[in-house]
Image: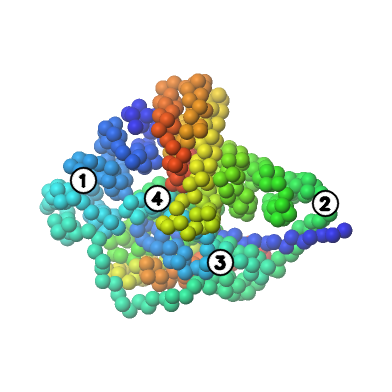
Amino acid sequence: MAFVNVPSREIFVKIVYYGAGLCGKTANVEHIHARAPEAAKGNLVSLKTESERTLFFDFMPLEIGQIRGYRVRLHLYTVPGQVFYKASRKLILRGVDGVVFVVDSQSARIEANVEALEDLGDNLAEIGESLREIPCVVQYNKRDLPGIEPIPSLRALCNPMGVPEVESAANKGVGVTETLQAAARGVLLRLNRKVA
Amino acid sequence: MKRNEIDALVRAHRGRARPVAFLHVLRQARLDEDDQLFLREHASELAVPDLLVWRSRCEPGFTGTVLRALARIALEDPSQFEHEVLDAPRFSLDDDEWIELADLTRGKVPPRIFDRISARGVRAEVEARHDIEKPPEADVDLAGFVESVLDEIALPEPAAVVAIDATLAPEAILDRARNAWSPEERVMLLEWAARQGLPRKSLVDIAVHAIRAGETEPRLRIFLASQIGSRAAWESFGLDVVLAFLDRGAFSSLSSLCALVFSEARGAPAVRGVPGQEEPKGLLSAMTAAFAAALVHVARESLVASLPARAMAALSALACLAPPPRLSRSIHDLLRAPGVSGEILALVELNVRLVKHSSARDASFESIVAAIHCLADVEPEA
């Protein structure tokens, strides 16, 4: 009798970029879209207002291909900044495997960053996750601007979890890939722990 | 919109004005007097992006309420005002508006903010530091990176998890997919069956049945997206697919499915290469029709079952869509459904009016997403 073995094992990773309004979440995904290999990237779906604020989400699928016998896919999402709806952010967070928390390094935005982190914690709790458990990377963005806070002070406020950190200037592409890699790494490590 | 329609939408959204402003009133191309009155009454609840959209919908010279709301934000939280208004991309005001804003904030905000208002100081290109090194203009090597992490963590080699007897009749393969012992096995069997050219209808039926049974794993969605990526597929299966997700209240999964379908369609040969990357209008029109038909169905069923809140949620979401003309009759028929009076009647009449003036060309991905988020706002996912 002829048999066909279907060896397909798949690693599917959903990563959500979270943070205060205009902190650079979309800039991260746009840069990855611009630099991802043509064969890997799907089309970027971006819903914005006239003033370039993310309305509901940005979405980009990445098909990394077959690696070590696994078919690897990443789905990247951003949430709208604090100004829109909790229901929308929760909708996008559902099923998340890893989070990139984007911090706006400008001194004037400290309070907004802290509020966004609290909001993230609340929304994760509502979907049965927690900041302590979920793979997370803190990205200190806009490091190229004047009037920014030193990293230790941002760390004290925005990374009480002690998760991996990356400094970035997302609009120039600085630190963007490193951030995605750190997030994907965290998710794969957690997956391995689950398998084990 | 008429005032009674807006009030009914507020009731549908459990008394909250802001979702109605964001999901309905401000999404209209034009605002009439009742819309303006509603926004004026709730100006203090609107956030900066809402206010900026509102301003863009006002006739010149009639933006006083928006400016007073912006001035209030400047007084209460100057740094938020600076970040979200003055530094917002593409923000600008007319000369008389800058003068009015300056009059409203003079002596009440920090001098730095007032100076920017007086000088019409919108987003300036700040001098960035030059000691930050830009990354090379090369492609991101994601595959190499994932490979190195997999090496590091030593995930087990994937085993051959499903053995399929290739001599089995197609119906036997489908039976096995229907009765799979795990979601993972089911998806693998469906993928294999699709590669063998088995009828799409049977494959979609099995996937829809699995969703109705509560299977929401991403791979099933990805498979389903691959099967319903065309206008014809949405016309054939769209209603069943959308209803399966709506009946489970799986709004997040439904949103992901639509995003995948839309993302893939935007890259399809039929639309790629068209200047300005035209949207796949035929697909969007079929998706919108499927969504609208599903929402009409949910509204009717809810009315029959005396579930007015659920009916109002469906009718509110339907109003986000610009329901296509082909649904005109079924929307009109809702007027005769049991329990249609008061606010529910106002919502049905709103949709009757919208369908009368809509065109298949109005279909947009944004409106489909708005409808899903509208449902999630009214009846949060379990």
Q: Are marks 1 and 3 in contact (CB under 8 Å)?
A: no
Determine if residue B7 is in view: no
Q: Are marks 4 and 3 on the same chain?
A: yes
Question: Label 4 belongs to which residue?
Answer: A55
Q: Residues within 10 Å of mark 1 (few under 14, many from 20)?
A: many
Judging from the image, what secondary structure is the residue with disc 2 in? loop
Left or right, A180 with reference to B164 = left
- Count of numbered badges drawn on the protein: 4
Question: Label 1 belongs to which residue?
Answer: B67
Q: Chain of mark 1?
A: B
Q: Tell me which residue sits at (33%, 51%) in the image.
A: A50
Question: Label 2 belongs to which residue?
Answer: B168
Using the image, determine if residue B183 lies above or below residue B342.
below
Q: Quadrant of the N terminus of chain B?
A: top left
Q: Are marks 4 and 2 in contact (CB under 8 Å)?
A: no
Q: Nearer the viewer, mark 1 or mark 2?
A: 2
Q: Are marks 1 and 3 on the same chain?
A: no
Q: Tell me which residue sits at (38%, 33%) in the image.
A: B10
Q: Residues within 10 Å of mark 3 (few under 14, many from 20)?
A: few
Q: Are marks 2 and 3 in contact (CB under 8 Å)?
A: no
> Between disc 4 and disc 3, whose residue precedes?
3
> How far apart are the alpha carbons under marks 4 and 3?
28 Å
Q: Nearer the viewer, mark 4 or mark 2?
A: 2
> How far apart are the alpha carbons under marks 2 and 3?
35 Å
Q: Are marks 1 and 4 in contact (CB under 8 Å)?
A: no
Q: Chain of mark 3?
A: A
Given the image, on which type of amino acid does mark 4 rest?
Leu
> How far apart are the alpha carbons under marks 1 and 3?
48 Å
Left or right, B86 with reference to B260 = left
Furthest residue in direction right, as rendered: A1
